[in-house]
Amino acid sequence: MAGNPRDKYCIVGVGETEYSRASGRTTRAMGAEAIRNAMNDAGLTPDDVDGMLSYHGGDSTPSTSIQYDLGIRPNFYMDCSGGGSSTEALVGLAIGAIEAGMCDVVAIFRSMNGYSNIRIGGTGARASAPIGGLDLMKRPYGLISAVQQFSYTFTRHMAEYGVKSEDLAAIKAAHSNHASNNPKALMKHRVTVDDVMNSRWIIRPVAHLLDCCLETDNATCVIVTSAERARDLKHKPIYVKGVQGRGTKPGGDFHYQHGPISRVAGHYVGPRVFDLAGVKHEDVDITGCYDAFTYTVLLQFEDYGWCEKGEGKDYVTSGIINLGGKRPNNLSGGHLCEGYTHGMNMVIENVRQLRGTVDDYCPGALEGDHTYDYSEGGCRQVQDAKISMNMGWGTPAVGSSLIMGNVLS
Protein backbone atom coordinates (compact mmCIF):
# COMPACT_ATOMS: atom_id res chain seq x y z
CA MET A 1 0.00 0.00 0.00
CA ALA A 2 1.15 3.55 -0.75
CA GLY A 3 2.75 5.28 2.20
CA ASN A 4 2.88 2.12 4.30
CA PRO A 5 4.81 3.02 7.51
CA ARG A 6 5.65 -0.60 8.35
CA ASP A 7 8.55 -0.86 10.85
CA LYS A 8 9.11 2.92 10.79
CA TYR A 9 7.53 3.51 14.20
CA CYS A 10 7.78 1.81 17.58
CA ILE A 11 6.14 1.55 20.96
CA VAL A 12 8.98 2.45 23.30
CA GLY A 13 7.37 2.91 26.70
CA VAL A 14 4.49 1.32 28.60
CA GLY A 15 3.13 2.04 32.06
CA GLU A 16 0.09 1.67 34.27
CA THR A 17 -1.26 2.19 37.76
CA GLU A 18 -2.64 -0.43 40.11
CA TYR A 19 -5.82 -2.16 38.92
CA SER A 20 -8.27 -1.68 41.77
CA ARG A 21 -11.91 -1.12 42.67
CA ALA A 22 -11.29 1.74 45.07
CA SER A 23 -8.48 3.95 43.81
CA GLY A 24 -9.37 6.84 46.12
CA ARG A 25 -7.70 9.05 43.53
CA THR A 26 -8.64 11.35 40.68
CA THR A 27 -8.20 10.28 37.09
CA ARG A 28 -5.84 13.24 36.79
CA ALA A 29 -3.49 11.80 39.41
CA MET A 30 -3.69 8.30 37.94
CA GLY A 31 -3.17 9.52 34.37
CA ALA A 32 -0.05 11.43 35.39
CA GLU A 33 1.32 8.35 37.16
CA ALA A 34 0.75 6.06 34.18
CA ILE A 35 2.44 8.48 31.76
CA ARG A 36 5.35 8.98 34.16
CA ASN A 37 5.77 5.24 34.47
CA ALA A 38 5.78 4.87 30.68
CA MET A 39 8.35 7.66 30.32
CA ASN A 40 10.57 6.01 32.92
CA ASP A 41 10.14 2.69 31.14
CA ALA A 42 11.34 4.25 27.88
CA GLY A 43 14.08 6.37 29.44
CA LEU A 44 12.39 9.62 28.36
CA THR A 45 11.92 12.93 30.18
CA PRO A 46 8.95 15.33 29.98
CA ASP A 47 10.99 17.48 27.61
CA ASP A 48 11.15 14.55 25.17
CA VAL A 49 7.38 14.05 24.96
CA ASP A 50 5.72 16.59 22.68
CA GLY A 51 2.51 14.81 21.71
CA MET A 52 -0.43 13.49 23.75
CA LEU A 53 -3.47 11.44 22.80
CA SER A 54 -6.12 10.01 25.07
CA TYR A 55 -9.24 7.95 24.96
CA HIS A 56 -11.43 10.49 26.70
CA GLY A 57 -14.78 9.70 28.24
CA GLY A 58 -16.65 9.27 31.48
CA ASP A 59 -14.65 10.77 34.34
CA SER A 60 -11.32 10.95 32.49
CA THR A 61 -9.09 14.04 32.62
CA PRO A 62 -7.98 15.85 29.43
CA SER A 63 -4.39 16.09 28.26
CA THR A 64 -4.21 19.82 28.96
CA SER A 65 -4.54 19.21 32.71
CA ILE A 66 -2.21 16.24 32.95
CA GLN A 67 0.49 17.91 30.83
CA TYR A 68 0.75 20.60 33.50
CA ASP A 69 1.32 18.04 36.24
CA LEU A 70 4.12 16.38 34.27
CA GLY A 71 5.80 19.45 32.79
CA ILE A 72 5.01 18.37 29.21
CA ARG A 73 4.44 21.03 26.55
CA PRO A 74 2.78 19.33 23.57
CA ASN A 75 3.20 20.46 19.99
CA PHE A 76 0.15 18.29 19.31
CA TYR A 77 -2.58 16.82 21.47
CA MET A 78 -6.07 15.41 21.03
CA ASP A 79 -8.56 13.80 23.41
CA CYS A 80 -10.71 11.35 21.47
CA SER A 81 -13.89 9.56 22.47
CA GLY A 82 -14.86 6.21 21.09
CA GLY A 83 -14.94 2.78 22.62
CA GLY A 84 -12.92 -0.38 22.94
CA SER A 85 -11.38 0.00 19.50
CA SER A 86 -9.64 3.21 20.60
CA THR A 87 -6.21 1.98 21.68
CA GLU A 88 -5.13 0.54 18.33
CA ALA A 89 -6.66 3.48 16.44
CA LEU A 90 -4.79 5.97 18.63
CA VAL A 91 -1.49 4.23 17.86
CA GLY A 92 -2.25 4.84 14.19
CA LEU A 93 -3.14 8.48 14.84
CA ALA A 94 0.12 8.95 16.77
CA ILE A 95 2.06 7.60 13.79
CA GLY A 96 0.16 9.97 11.50
CA ALA A 97 0.92 12.97 13.72
CA ILE A 98 4.64 12.15 13.77
CA GLU A 99 4.66 11.45 10.03
CA ALA A 100 3.02 14.84 9.42
CA GLY A 101 5.76 16.57 11.42
CA MET A 102 3.44 17.80 14.17
CA CYS A 103 5.42 16.11 16.95
CA ASP A 104 8.09 13.49 17.62
CA VAL A 105 7.09 11.45 20.70
CA VAL A 106 3.45 10.74 21.58
CA ALA A 107 2.09 9.53 24.93
CA ILE A 108 -1.28 7.75 24.55
CA PHE A 109 -3.19 7.29 27.80
CA ARG A 110 -6.50 6.21 29.29
CA SER A 111 -7.49 7.05 32.86
CA MET A 112 -10.77 5.94 34.42
CA ASN A 113 -12.40 5.18 37.74
CA GLY A 114 -14.41 2.49 36.03
CA TYR A 115 -15.70 0.93 39.22
CA SER A 116 -15.81 3.64 41.88
CA ASN A 117 -17.22 6.36 39.61
CA ILE A 118 -18.47 5.98 36.03
CA ARG A 119 -19.26 2.28 35.67
CA ILE A 120 -19.30 1.11 32.06
CA GLY A 121 -22.03 -1.41 32.86
CA GLY A 122 -24.62 1.37 33.17
CA THR A 123 -24.86 1.45 36.95
CA GLY A 124 -23.45 3.91 39.48
CA ALA A 125 -23.00 7.51 38.33
CA ARG A 126 -23.75 6.56 34.73
CA ALA A 127 -27.27 5.34 35.53
CA SER A 128 -28.46 8.87 36.39
CA ALA A 129 -26.86 10.56 33.37
CA PRO A 130 -29.16 12.43 30.97
CA ILE A 131 -30.19 10.47 27.87
CA GLY A 132 -29.06 11.88 24.53
CA GLY A 133 -27.57 11.01 21.16
CA LEU A 134 -27.54 7.36 20.22
CA ASP A 135 -28.77 6.40 23.71
CA LEU A 136 -32.20 7.64 22.64
CA MET A 137 -32.34 4.60 20.34
CA LYS A 138 -31.20 2.18 23.04
CA ARG A 139 -31.94 2.98 26.68
CA PRO A 140 -35.76 3.30 26.39
CA TYR A 141 -35.74 -0.32 25.19
CA GLY A 142 -33.57 -1.63 28.01
CA LEU A 143 -30.32 -1.63 26.01
CA ILE A 144 -28.30 0.13 28.69
CA SER A 145 -25.16 -1.96 29.15
CA ALA A 146 -22.80 -3.25 26.49
CA VAL A 147 -23.66 -6.87 27.23
CA GLN A 148 -27.27 -6.09 26.36
CA GLN A 149 -26.45 -4.06 23.25
CA PHE A 150 -24.11 -6.68 21.78
CA SER A 151 -26.17 -9.71 22.74
CA TYR A 152 -28.26 -9.87 19.56
CA THR A 153 -25.18 -10.53 17.46
CA PHE A 154 -24.08 -13.49 19.53
CA THR A 155 -27.55 -14.87 20.21
CA ARG A 156 -27.94 -15.23 16.45
CA HIS A 157 -24.45 -16.73 16.20
CA MET A 158 -25.29 -19.34 18.85
CA ALA A 159 -28.44 -20.29 16.97
CA GLU A 160 -26.62 -20.54 13.63
CA TYR A 161 -23.51 -22.43 14.73
CA GLY A 162 -24.44 -24.35 17.86
CA VAL A 163 -22.10 -22.61 20.28
CA LYS A 164 -22.78 -23.55 23.89
CA SER A 165 -22.13 -21.66 27.11
CA GLU A 166 -19.45 -24.22 27.98
CA ASP A 167 -17.47 -23.16 24.90
CA LEU A 168 -17.47 -19.55 26.06
CA ALA A 169 -16.56 -20.58 29.60
CA ALA A 170 -13.33 -22.14 28.26
CA ILE A 171 -12.18 -18.63 27.28
CA LYS A 172 -12.62 -17.35 30.83
CA ALA A 173 -10.82 -20.39 32.21
CA ALA A 174 -7.84 -19.79 29.89
CA HIS A 175 -7.57 -16.10 30.71
CA SER A 176 -7.85 -16.81 34.44
CA ASN A 177 -4.96 -19.27 34.15
CA HIS A 178 -2.85 -16.51 32.66
CA ALA A 179 -3.93 -14.00 35.31
CA SER A 180 -2.94 -16.42 38.07
CA ASN A 181 0.68 -15.79 37.01
CA ASN A 182 0.24 -12.00 36.91
CA PRO A 183 1.06 -10.09 40.11
CA LYS A 184 -0.90 -7.05 38.82
CA ALA A 185 -4.16 -8.86 38.02
CA LEU A 186 -7.18 -7.93 40.11
CA MET A 187 -8.64 -11.44 39.76
CA LYS A 188 -5.76 -13.87 40.23
CA HIS A 189 -7.54 -17.11 41.07
CA ARG A 190 -8.07 -19.75 38.41
CA VAL A 191 -11.64 -20.65 37.52
CA THR A 192 -13.03 -23.68 35.73
CA VAL A 193 -15.70 -24.08 33.10
CA ASP A 194 -18.03 -25.28 35.85
CA ASP A 195 -17.31 -22.15 37.90
CA VAL A 196 -18.42 -19.99 34.99
CA MET A 197 -21.50 -22.10 34.33
CA ASN A 198 -22.51 -21.93 37.99
CA SER A 199 -22.23 -18.14 38.20
CA ARG A 200 -25.50 -16.25 37.86
CA TRP A 201 -26.96 -15.28 34.53
CA ILE A 202 -26.50 -11.67 33.41
CA ILE A 203 -28.30 -12.04 30.09
CA ARG A 204 -29.56 -15.29 28.63
CA PRO A 205 -28.28 -17.15 26.69
CA VAL A 206 -24.98 -15.37 26.10
CA ALA A 207 -23.42 -14.34 29.41
CA HIS A 208 -23.06 -15.56 32.96
CA LEU A 209 -21.45 -13.24 35.49
CA LEU A 210 -18.00 -14.76 34.91
CA ASP A 211 -18.38 -14.32 31.14
CA CYS A 212 -18.23 -10.56 31.76
CA CYS A 213 -15.17 -8.34 32.19
CA LEU A 214 -14.13 -6.73 35.43
CA GLU A 215 -14.87 -3.10 36.26
CA THR A 216 -11.77 -1.38 37.59
CA ASP A 217 -10.10 1.93 38.47
CA ASN A 218 -6.82 2.40 36.60
CA ALA A 219 -4.75 4.41 34.16
CA THR A 220 -2.57 3.08 31.34
CA CYS A 221 -0.13 4.55 28.82
CA VAL A 222 1.89 3.60 25.74
CA ILE A 223 4.46 5.87 24.05
CA VAL A 224 5.05 5.95 20.30
CA THR A 225 8.00 7.41 18.39
CA SER A 226 10.07 6.78 15.28
CA ALA A 227 12.17 3.65 14.91
CA GLU A 228 15.23 5.87 14.52
CA ARG A 229 14.57 7.53 17.88
CA ALA A 230 13.67 4.18 19.47
CA ARG A 231 17.13 2.74 18.87
CA ASP A 232 18.60 5.19 21.41
CA LEU A 233 16.13 4.34 24.17
CA LYS A 234 16.01 1.88 27.04
CA HIS A 235 14.47 -1.26 25.53
CA LYS A 236 14.76 -3.10 22.27
CA PRO A 237 12.41 -1.52 19.71
CA ILE A 238 8.95 -3.01 19.30
CA TYR A 239 7.99 -2.17 15.75
CA VAL A 240 4.49 -1.30 14.59
CA LYS A 241 4.11 -3.47 11.51
CA GLY A 242 0.52 -2.65 10.72
CA VAL A 243 -2.37 -0.77 12.28
CA GLN A 244 -5.95 -0.42 11.15
CA GLY A 245 -8.18 1.93 13.13
CA ARG A 246 -11.93 1.82 13.58
CA GLY A 247 -13.06 0.01 10.49
CA THR A 248 -16.80 -0.55 10.37
CA LYS A 249 -19.42 -2.84 8.99
CA PRO A 250 -21.90 -1.40 6.48
CA GLY A 251 -24.50 0.54 8.40
CA GLY A 252 -22.32 1.30 11.41
CA ASP A 253 -24.31 0.98 14.62
CA PHE A 254 -27.30 -0.09 12.55
CA HIS A 255 -25.29 -2.96 11.10
CA TYR A 256 -28.07 -5.48 11.67
CA GLN A 257 -29.77 -4.03 8.59
CA HIS A 258 -26.75 -4.84 6.39
CA GLY A 259 -25.33 -8.32 6.01
CA PRO A 260 -25.16 -11.11 8.59
CA ILE A 261 -25.86 -9.88 12.10
CA SER A 262 -23.40 -12.50 13.39
CA ARG A 263 -20.53 -10.93 11.41
CA VAL A 264 -18.34 -8.36 13.20
CA ALA A 265 -15.97 -5.64 12.02
CA GLY A 266 -12.91 -7.90 12.06
CA HIS A 267 -14.18 -9.34 8.77
CA TYR A 268 -13.27 -6.01 7.15
CA VAL A 269 -10.39 -4.88 9.38
CA GLY A 270 -8.43 -8.13 9.35
CA PRO A 271 -7.44 -8.41 5.67
CA ARG A 272 -6.25 -4.79 5.63
CA VAL A 273 -4.04 -5.03 8.71
CA PHE A 274 -2.43 -8.30 7.57
CA ASP A 275 -1.71 -6.70 4.20
CA LEU A 276 -0.20 -3.62 5.84
CA ALA A 277 1.95 -5.72 8.17
CA GLY A 278 3.10 -8.14 5.50
CA VAL A 279 2.46 -11.15 7.74
CA LYS A 280 0.13 -14.12 7.68
CA HIS A 281 -1.88 -15.70 10.48
CA GLU A 282 0.70 -18.44 10.95
CA ASP A 283 3.42 -15.83 11.58
CA VAL A 284 1.69 -14.51 14.71
CA ASP A 285 2.91 -15.94 18.03
CA ILE A 286 0.55 -14.26 20.52
CA THR A 287 -2.77 -12.43 20.37
CA GLY A 288 -4.57 -9.85 22.46
CA CYS A 289 -8.27 -10.14 21.73
CA TYR A 290 -10.74 -7.69 23.27
CA ASP A 291 -12.57 -9.60 25.97
CA ALA A 292 -15.29 -7.35 27.29
CA PHE A 293 -17.22 -10.63 27.29
CA THR A 294 -16.18 -14.13 26.39
CA TYR A 295 -18.30 -14.04 23.25
CA THR A 296 -16.47 -10.99 21.83
CA VAL A 297 -13.33 -13.15 21.77
CA LEU A 298 -14.94 -16.01 19.88
CA LEU A 299 -16.55 -13.70 17.31
CA GLN A 300 -13.27 -11.91 16.60
CA PHE A 301 -11.25 -15.08 16.25
CA GLU A 302 -13.66 -16.16 13.52
CA ASP A 303 -13.95 -12.91 11.61
CA TYR A 304 -10.25 -12.06 11.78
CA GLY A 305 -9.70 -15.42 10.09
CA TRP A 306 -8.04 -17.52 12.79
CA CYS A 307 -10.62 -20.18 12.00
CA GLU A 308 -13.61 -20.58 9.72
CA LYS A 309 -16.96 -19.04 10.60
CA GLY A 310 -18.71 -21.37 12.99
CA GLU A 311 -15.46 -23.01 14.14
CA GLY A 312 -14.65 -20.51 16.90
CA LYS A 313 -15.95 -22.91 19.54
CA ASP A 314 -13.38 -25.49 18.44
CA TYR A 315 -10.59 -22.89 18.27
CA VAL A 316 -11.08 -21.63 21.84
CA THR A 317 -11.50 -25.10 23.38
CA SER A 318 -8.55 -26.70 21.56
CA GLY A 319 -5.80 -25.33 23.83
CA ILE A 320 -4.43 -22.96 21.18
CA ILE A 321 -5.21 -19.86 23.25
CA ASN A 322 -3.70 -21.19 26.49
CA LEU A 323 -0.18 -20.64 27.81
CA GLY A 324 1.88 -23.41 26.26
CA GLY A 325 -0.49 -23.54 23.28
CA LYS A 326 0.26 -22.61 19.70
CA ARG A 327 -0.96 -19.00 19.97
CA PRO A 328 -1.85 -17.93 23.52
CA ASN A 329 -4.28 -15.05 23.99
CA ASN A 330 -4.53 -12.25 26.59
CA LEU A 331 -1.54 -13.33 28.59
CA SER A 332 -2.12 -10.83 31.40
CA GLY A 333 -5.66 -12.13 31.94
CA GLY A 334 -7.13 -9.34 29.83
CA HIS A 335 -10.31 -7.54 30.73
CA LEU A 336 -11.85 -10.68 32.13
CA CYS A 337 -9.24 -11.03 34.87
CA GLU A 338 -6.52 -8.34 34.97
CA GLY A 339 -8.56 -5.13 34.67
CA TYR A 340 -10.74 -3.20 32.26
CA THR A 341 -8.84 -0.54 30.28
CA HIS A 342 -10.56 -0.31 26.87
CA GLY A 343 -7.86 -2.52 25.39
CA MET A 344 -4.72 -0.70 26.54
CA ASN A 345 -3.58 -3.41 28.95
CA MET A 346 -3.54 -6.04 26.18
CA VAL A 347 -1.25 -3.85 24.05
CA ILE A 348 0.99 -3.22 27.08
CA GLU A 349 1.17 -6.96 27.75
CA ASN A 350 2.12 -7.78 24.17
CA VAL A 351 4.87 -5.14 24.17
CA ARG A 352 6.36 -6.76 27.27
CA GLN A 353 5.93 -10.23 25.81
CA LEU A 354 7.86 -9.21 22.69
CA ARG A 355 10.59 -7.69 24.88
CA GLY A 356 10.73 -10.85 26.99
CA THR A 357 10.21 -8.79 30.16
CA VAL A 358 6.77 -9.61 31.56
CA ASP A 359 6.43 -9.39 35.32
CA ASP A 360 5.33 -12.77 36.67
CA TYR A 361 6.18 -14.97 39.62
CA CYS A 362 9.48 -16.23 38.18
CA PRO A 363 12.33 -15.41 40.60
CA GLY A 364 14.37 -13.83 37.80
CA ALA A 365 11.53 -12.11 35.95
CA LEU A 366 12.93 -8.59 36.35
CA GLU A 367 16.13 -9.72 34.64
CA GLY A 368 14.20 -11.51 31.90
CA ASP A 369 15.10 -14.93 33.35
CA HIS A 370 11.90 -16.95 32.98
CA THR A 371 11.22 -20.60 33.79
CA TYR A 372 8.41 -21.14 31.22
CA ASP A 373 6.66 -23.14 33.91
CA TYR A 374 3.02 -22.23 33.37
CA SER A 375 1.59 -23.81 36.51
CA GLU A 376 -0.35 -21.54 38.87
CA GLY A 377 1.77 -18.84 40.46
CA GLY A 378 4.50 -19.32 37.88
CA CYS A 379 5.55 -17.92 34.50
CA ARG A 380 3.52 -16.28 31.77
CA GLN A 381 6.33 -15.30 29.37
CA VAL A 382 5.96 -16.91 25.95
CA GLN A 383 9.28 -18.25 24.74
CA ASP A 384 10.75 -16.57 21.64
CA ALA A 385 7.62 -14.59 20.74
CA LYS A 386 8.35 -12.38 17.72
CA ILE A 387 5.01 -11.20 16.33
CA SER A 388 1.85 -10.16 18.19
CA MET A 389 -1.60 -9.04 17.12
CA ASN A 390 -4.16 -7.00 19.05
CA MET A 391 -7.83 -6.92 18.06
CA GLY A 392 -9.91 -4.06 19.48
CA TRP A 393 -13.71 -4.05 19.72
CA GLY A 394 -15.90 -0.97 19.88
CA THR A 395 -19.20 -2.61 19.01
CA PRO A 396 -19.97 -5.57 16.75
CA ALA A 397 -19.81 -3.01 13.94
CA VAL A 398 -16.56 -1.23 14.87
CA GLY A 399 -13.08 -2.68 15.24
CA SER A 400 -9.37 -1.87 15.17
CA SER A 401 -6.22 -3.97 15.02
CA LEU A 402 -2.48 -3.66 15.64
CA ILE A 403 0.35 -5.99 14.62
CA MET A 404 3.72 -5.55 16.33
CA GLY A 405 7.06 -7.31 16.18
CA ASN A 406 10.50 -7.30 17.75
CA VAL A 407 12.29 -7.91 14.45
CA LEU A 408 12.37 -6.00 11.18
CA SER A 409 10.55 -7.49 8.20
Image: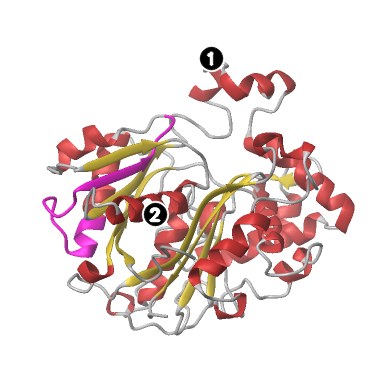
- Give x and y (percent) for residue 148: 70, 35
Disc 2 vs disc 1: Cβ atoms closer than 8 Å?
no
Q: As rendered, which of 9 and 215 lies closer to the eye?
A: 9
Q: Which type of secondary structure does the marked residue at label 2 adopt?
A: helix
Residue 323 on the magenta span: no
- Whether 273 is drawn above or below 259: the answer is below
Q: Residue flagged by tag 2: what amino acid is it?
A: Val
- Whether 312 is drawn above or below 354: the answer is above
Residue 41 on the magenta span: yes
- Give x and y (percent) for residue 243: 47, 60
Horizontally, residue 188 falls left or right of residue 61, namely right
Span shown in magenta: 38-58
The residue singled out by tag 1 in the image is: 130
Q: As rendered, which of 255 and 290 lies closer to the eye?
A: 255
Q: As rendered, which of 372 and 151 lies closer to the eye?
A: 151
Q: Which type of secondary structure does the marked residue at label 1 adopt?
A: loop
> Image point 31% across, 50% down: which residue?
97
The residue singled out by tag 2 in the image is: 91
> Image point 28% across, 50% down: which residue?
107
- Give x and y (percent) for residue 101: 24, 52
Task: Estimate how packed mark 2 is, as few (under 14), some (14 to 19) or many (20 or more) residues with alpha carbons within 10 Å.
Answer: many
Q: Is residue 43 visible?
A: yes
Horizontally, residue 158 falls left or right of residue 173, namely right
Task: Estimate how packed mark 1 is, as few (under 14), some (14 to 19) or many (20 or more) residues with alpha carbons within 10 Å.
Answer: few
Q: CA distance from mark 2 to mark 1?
A: 32 Å
Q: Residue flagged by tag 1: what amino acid is it?
A: Pro
